[in-house]
Image: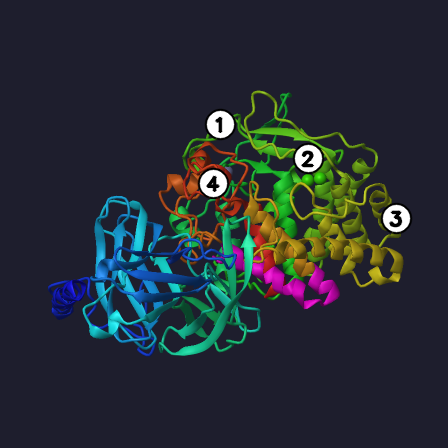
Amino acid sequence: MKKLLVLLLSFLIVGMLVSSIFNMSKEENPNIPSSTPTAETQEPPLTKVNYAPIEVDNTTGFETSWYTGASDANVNLQASYNEKVINIEYPGTTLESATFFREGIPFKKGDDYIIVFDIESSVQRNVELILKNADSQEILYKQPIAIGENKQIRVEFNMDKETCWNGEFLLNIGNDGQEVTSSYHTITIRNLNIVNATDSDNSIKVNHIGYRINDQKQAVFPYSQGDSFNVIDVNTGAVVYTGAIKNKVSNSKTGEMNFIGDFTNVMTPGKYRIESQICGTSFEFEIGDHVFKTVATDLLKMLTIQRCGYDLSTDYIGDLAHASCHHTDALIYGTDQIISVRGGWHDAGDYGRYVETGVKTLSDLLFGYMANSAYFEDNLAIPESGNGISDILDEAKYELDWLLKMQTSWGEIYSKVVTPSFAGDIIPEQDNQQLYVVGSSTTTTADFVAIMALASQIYADVDPDFSNKCLEAAKLSWDYLLSSVNNGEIKNPEDIQAGEYRDSKDSDERFYAAIAMWSVTQDKLYLDIAKEVYNQDNTSAQGLSWKDIGGFGRYLYLVNENAKNDKEFYELMKTSLVNDANVLQGIAYSDGYSTALEHYSWGSNGSIADNGILLSMAYNITNEMSYRQLAIEQVNYLLGKNVLNRSYVVGYGQNSPTNMHSRLAKAKNTILKGALVGGANSDRDDALLNELGENTPAAKMYLDRYNSYSTNEVSIYWNSGLLHLILSLD
Ligand SMILES: [Ca+2]
Ligand SMILES: [Ca+2]
Ligand SMILES: [Ca+2]
Ligand SMILES: [Zn+2]
């Protein structure tokens, strides 16, 4: 009897309490939404783009983190992945008599959270949702909820207190003072998600620029509990496509779970964003035929900006306008001889000029032109626009003309033009140090032969005189090369601080040189030498980087109309290419972003572009569509579909670098628009990276800081790689 009286009394008190909270207007308690949304009501569009889900269910299917508690009540919990059924045998005397909770949720000061779950009860009743600091018991948020039939609860919460690492989600599910509550009933909770809406590292990842109409289109989601995503037309607000979030991939390179949403079927040109109830909203992007054209143009014009020894007015390069620089004669290191080596491109964030990287860059430009010669016309607003020649060939010729100056009278090629020390953060025309021509090697000599032979082929129609000049130069250096053995990598003298670009293996350069000579002359002698080089070192046909560059030779062979006449060597080259592509495919398939990179070292973005080029080459030779799709995914990575949700091309997409390591941009206090930065580097090659925690996943080892030169520098040969990739696909 006494117990019943206490019960009745507490029903009354709790009932009064609950009703007073319910009657409180939104103005009095801003934490209470004016209406509790249900699954049926349309959510207002989310305004934030970054959402990080907090793991509220473990992923093995066994529940470990959720509990029920009772003081004078009797409840038990049947929990499975994604569903918790609470049996309330006896509700106790107060709403607080029974609880359902989970601790260990971080609530960070200033961050916004979204909490979404479905709840139903076998009887109509009231419960109370509480977010609190489990250590201090301070209540952070409180909301009464009336439940019965299944409904969705959605709460938005801003953490305005000090960060609390042991936050708690709690429902008070004891006696709410209503008759019905005192009888046995169940409460079921499903699809519970707690999302940090401020965290920038976890959101829906898309290519920020866009997707071409017929390409595979995927977004990467950080989380899924069987939910779907919508593709929204930004202009009309209409949902144009709904798809499932699926294909969970555990990604060790990003430290995440990745889930994939495919919207390849959206093929109407327009501007879109992707939304999911749980993960929020992606950046906006385009679907269209020519989405990469503008970025490709600026990728090329970055090379114009890098021109050395040329007066570049604002007409051509805007804020980055600079006068002619480094045009004095250079001393040949260790001698008193001087030569004129004016011209060429500054390599990167520094003002050095290097044959190794120049030839890689030129290879990308000329192969890109071969793949897609109509892409750029004569109108890019560079100094040679309007001369009747495609501007990509004009830009390439600026470097080729410089390379010709690096040739000795006996055919050997000098390796670099540098100053004794790296310039400070000054504009190039203020760097008045003595110029030195340093070193020579068989790698740079073979590089020279390859690119001059290729240039002779490419310019034959547009500029026959130049084409002949290139071929003569190539032959002179070829003869020197044949009579020279590998003279090893070039190390800088002690009193020269410059990029080293050390390359101890010259078989790949020799292979490329021999194929390029064969390609332009069709003289079998060169092909025989290429085969000889390949037979001695079958890695000589691999690589698209400044160091290992033989892959350009391999592809140049495969696309030659006479290649198939030598069926055996053709198949050898084709198999070599396909094998390389299959290795990359394996790597890409184990990564939710389809990134074809195993190790994130210095210049990872350049490697990703190069690997994309290789996949694109494999597609062109085999017509195997999966290679092409993966090649496109490498473009997507570089333009924003990556763990950091960053476009790595300065000035393009959201969240692109603003503190790129470029002396010119720094001295001009502006950005180097159109430059691809080096990207994540798990080798910690600059001191700033030590600010990132010991366990930072490889693909997140990036800092948009000027002094993180090993992640945020620009270079001509990373730019050219992405440009070549786009040209090969577009
Ligand atoms: Ca032109
Ligand atoms: Ca090399
Ligand atoms: Ca090499
Ligand atoms: Zn210069």
- Disc 3 and disc 4: Cα gap in Å? 45 Å
Overall secondary structure of the magenta stretch? helix
| Residue toward you, 322 or 66 | 66
Residue count near mark 4 (Cα–Cα under 10 Å), binned few <14, some 14–19, many ≥20: some
Q: Residue at x 85, y 62 (%)?
A: 564
Q: Residue at x 83, y 60 (%)?
A: 563
Numbered circle sitting on residue 433: 1
Q: Residue at x 21, y 74 (%)?
A: 179
* Residue identified by numbered label 4: 324
- Disc 2 and disc 4: Cα gap in Å? 31 Å
Split into quadrants, the picture shows ligand 3 in the one at top right
Please provide the residue range marked out in magenta: 618-642
- Please report whichever mark, 3 or 4, sits nearer to the chain's N-terminal start: 4
SS class, disc 2:
loop
Q: Is residue 292 left or right of residue 493?
A: left
* Residue identified by numbered label 2: 503
- Please report whichever mark, 3 or 1, sits nearer to the chain's N-terminal start: 1
* Residue identified by numbered label 3: 528
**Whether residue 286 is situated above or below residue 335 in the rendered picture:** below
Asked if the stretch drawn in magenta spans residue 631, the answer is yes
Nearer to us: label 3 or label 1: 3
- Please report whichever mark, 3 or 2, sits nearer to the chain's N-terminal start: 2
